[in-house]
Every structure is written in structure tokens, then in C-alpha cells.
């Protein structure tokens, strides 16, 4: 049996906290603290998370070898209630990035008066290089490794970058097996058949589209005079595109991790979505 430390080269060179996202949130925090006239003592607890867990996740690969991946779960602040935050699978995930996301979630929940704190997590892995069975083993082992931090009254996970309903279902099942009974409230974003919410897939993109509509109205422009380019045509981006197109906005550009499309006259989002569903890519789409 061969043991491999996955992405070992990257992990040796990554400086966990020196991440652009974390530095940006620190800058925002500093700016807000000056406006609020916070003292250094009041600001100090907000500069770093309440707690952060780093775990090594060993996984039996389909070829018989064992690969180990680095995972994280961060609680930034739980003053308003249990942590709420996503789980992302990406080969550049580090502690600074997930901490920055937990900070943002804390502020979003506080601003919207929701009874949740901010949390986030992830695994440093290229999901595209895993088979479905390897992905399941990785998800279940990661859930077991962070189980001391998660729970309906402490930290509720949800889908994020490169995670989906299936990943959430595996997390829910693993947590439930450890508890001895079914715990649907441990995750959001799970399939509807096991308690998932209707409209969840479209909700984030709808919110972005709604915000843009309000912004255009505030600027006293009209949708007919506004063209839109959307960076990222995943779950959120595709929902943004369809919401705006349905409302009469002209979407002239879209992109994903493989490339982008442009058409000054506008892109038929429904036709593009059907093309992506059939070909798993925007490549070779003829009308942009």
C-alpha cells in the first residue's frame, strides 16, 4: 500500500493566513471599526476566528493506494446562534480562505438579523480527479474528523464551491450514523427527498438578480439600457442569468472555469443552458 500526501507541494508553500480573501476581510473590519470608534480591546476578538480546526483526511483510493488531504472547519463568531457556512472542495483551499468566508457569513447573518453565527470549511482537493466512490469516502471521513465542531445547535454546514446535494446527503448520513438517529438539520442544501428546501438551488442567484434590479432602479436606468456580463455560470451564476434574462435584461457575456462567451446582441440563456446540459461545457456553442 502506498501513502501519498495529496497536494504536498502546495501545502509546503502555502502560508495559511496570508490569503488575499482574509487580508481583504481584515481591511474591511479595520475600516468598519474606525467608523464605529471601536477600541483595540473591542476589535481584538474580531480579528481572528473563535476557533479553527485543521484535519488530515486519509482516503482509500480505487487503485488500492491511500491519499491524505488537508481539511478545515472554522467558527468565526457564534454570538447570535449556531454557526452557518459552506463546505468547499478546491485544490487551493487554505485556512485564510475559509476564515474569510466565515467572517463574511457572520456579518451577513448579523446584517439580516438572522439567528446564526459564521462558519466555513473545506478540503484542499481537486474534485475533478476523484471518482464518485473516492469522493464519498473523502466526504464521509472529513465529516467524521470535524464531528466535534458540527451539530444543529453548534454549526450547520451547506454546499459551496464544488459541493452539491449529494455531498450534503453523505455528510448528513455520516453524522446521523454517528448519533444513532437521523439528523436532517445538520446540513442545508440536501436533496428534497431527505428534507431539502424547495427553491434552494435558485435562491442565491435570485437574490443577486434582485439586488441588481434595485441598483439599476436606484441609478435611474432602465433594464433596456443595461447589458450584463456574468462571471461564473455555475449554480448561482446560471440562476442569475436566467432571472435577469426573464426580466428583460440583455446578457451579453458569460464565463465558467473553462472559458467565456460573448455576443453584443445578447445570449439566449435557455438555449445555452440546454447546450451545457447536453455537452457538459459551453465549448462549441455557435451563437456567441
Image: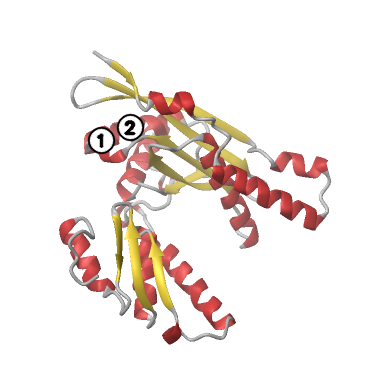
Residue 243 appears left or right of 207: left
Q: Which color scheme is applied? A: secondary structure
| Image coordinates for residue 21, horizontal then vertical, percent | 55, 46
Which quarter of the figure has residue 3? Answer: top left
Q: Residue at x 20, y 55 (%)?
A: 280
From what the image shows, is residue 33 above or below residue 277? above
Which quarter of the figure has residue 78? Answer: top right
Q: Residue at x 37, y 83 (%)?
A: 248
Q: Secondary structure at mark 1?
A: loop
Q: Badge 1: how crowded within 10 Å, few (<14), some, or many (20+)?
A: some
Disc 1 to disc 2, C-alpha distance: 9 Å
Name the one closer to the observer, 59 or 140: 59
Residue 256 appears left or right of 105: left
Name the one closer to the observer, 92 or 146: 92
Cβ atoms under marks 1 and 2 closer than 8 Å: yes
Name the one closer to the observer, 129 or 178: 129
Inspect this view and state whether residue 161 appears. yes
Name the one closer to the observer, 145 or 34: 34
Report which residue position mark 2 lands on: 138
Report which residue position mark 1 lands on: 130
Give the residue at the far top of this rendering.
Answer: 1
Residue 243 appears left or right of 100: left
Q: Residue at x 19, y 65 (%)?
A: 285
Amino acid at each position: 500500500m502506498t501513502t501519498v500526501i495529496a497536494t504536498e507541494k502546495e501545502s509546503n508553500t502555502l502560508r495559511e493566513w496570508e490569503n488575499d480573501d482574509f487580508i481583504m476581510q481584515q481591511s474591511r473590519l479595520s475600516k468598519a471599526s474606525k467608523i464605529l470608534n471601536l477600541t483595540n480591546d473591542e476589535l481584538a476578538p474580531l480579528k481572528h476566528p473563535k476557533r479553527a480546526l485543521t484535519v488530515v483526511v486519509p482516503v482509500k483510493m480505487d487503485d488500492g493506494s491511500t491519499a491524505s488531504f488537508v481539511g478545515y472547519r472554522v467558527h468565526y463568531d457564534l454570538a447570535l446562534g449556531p454557526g452557518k457556512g459552506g463546505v468547499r472542495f478546491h485544490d487551493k483551499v487554505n485556512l485564510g480562505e475559509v476564515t474569510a468566508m466565515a467572517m463574511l457569513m457572520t456579518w451577513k447573518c448579523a446584517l439580516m438579523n438572522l439567528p446564526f453565527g459564521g462558519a466555513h470549511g473545506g478540503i484542499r482537493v481537486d474534485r475533478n480527479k476523484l471518482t464518485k466512490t473516492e469522493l464519498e469516502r473523502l466526504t464521509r471521513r472529513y465529516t467524521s474528523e470535524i464531528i466535534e465542531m458540527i451539530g444543529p445547535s453548534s454549526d450547520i454546514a451547506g454546499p459551496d464551491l464544488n459541493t452539491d446535494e449529494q455531498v450534503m446527503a453523505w455528510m448528513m448520513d455520516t453524522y446521523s450514523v454517528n448519533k444513532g438517529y437521523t439528523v436532517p438539520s445538520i446540513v442545508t442544501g440536501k436533496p428534497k427527498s431527505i428534507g431539502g428546501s424547495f427553491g434552494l438551488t435558485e435562491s442565491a442567484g435570485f437574490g443577486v438578480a434582485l439586488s441588481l434590479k434595485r441598483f439599476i432602479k436606484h441609478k435611474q436606468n432602465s433594464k433596456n439600457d443595461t447589458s450584463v456580463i456574468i462571471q461564473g455560470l455555475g449554480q448561482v451564476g446560471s440562476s442569475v442569468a436566467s432571472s435577469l434574462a426573464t426580466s428583460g435584461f440583455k446578457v451579453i457575456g458569460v464565463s465558467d472555469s473553462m472559458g467565456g462567451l460573448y455576443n453584443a446582441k445578447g445570449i439566449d440563456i435557455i438555449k445555452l443552458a440546454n447546450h451545457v446540459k447536453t455537452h457538459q461545457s459551453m465549448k462549441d456553442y455557435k451563437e456567441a
